[in-house]
Image (cartoon, rainbow, N blue to C red):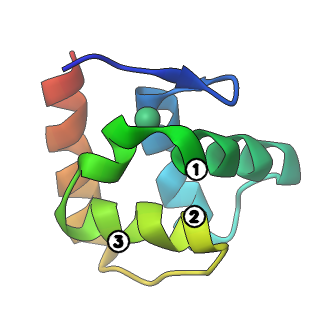
Amino acid sequence: MTERLEGGLWCHDVLSLLDQYIDGQLAAGDLAAVQAHVRVCEQCARFGGAYGRVVAAVRRGEATEPAPEQLQRLTARVLERLE
Ligand SMILES: [Zn+2]
C-alpha cells in the first residue's frame, strides 16, 4: 500500500487527525488540509467500514458520529497496513 501526499498531508496524517475531526477539535487549517487530501486521495477513499464513512463525511463537509472505540481500532489497523 502506497501512501499519498495530498493537501500537504500523508494518509497517516489524515488518519491521526480524524479522531479530532469527529470530536470537533480540528483546527480550521488542519480541517482544510484533511478535506483537500480526502477529496483527491483514492487511497483514503478505498478504506472501508467506519473509516470510509468518516472519509465520505469529510468529503461532503458533514459531521459524523461513529463509535469512537470502533474508529480507534480501525485507525490502528489501517496505520499498521500503511507501515
Ligand atoms: Zn490518503
Circles 3 and 2 in contact, beta carbons < 8 Å: no
Q: Earlier in the sequence, mark 3 or mark 2?
A: 3
Q: Residue 24: image x %, image y %?
A: 68, 71
> On the image, which quarter does residue 71 sit in?
bottom left
Q: CA distance from mark 3 to mark 1?
A: 13 Å
Front of the two marks 3 and 2: 2
Label 1 to label 2, Cα distance in Å? 6 Å
Residue 77 sits in which quadrant? top left
Dot 3 crowding, Cα within 10 Å, few <14, some 14–19, many 20+: some
Q: Report the residue at 44% width, 60% height from top.
A: 55
* Residue 15, position as x, y percentages in the image: 42, 42
Q: Are marks 3 and 1 in contact (CB under 8 Å)?
A: no
Which residue is denoted by mark 3 in the rendering? 53
12 lies above or below 14: above
Residue with the mark numbered 1: 39
Dot 3 amino acid type = Arg
Q: Is residue 29 left or right of residue 52?
A: right
Quarter in which the C terminus is drawn: top left
Q: Quadrant of the N terminus?
A: top left
Residue, x 30% and y 60% (percent of image)? 51
Q: Secondary structure at mark 3?
A: helix
Q: Nearer the viewer, residue 68 or 8?
A: 8
Disc 1 marks which amino acid?
Arg
Residue denoted by label 2: 59
Q: Check mark 2 vs ligand 1: CB closer than 8 Å? yes or no.
A: no
| Type of amino acid at the residue the image marks with label 2 | Arg
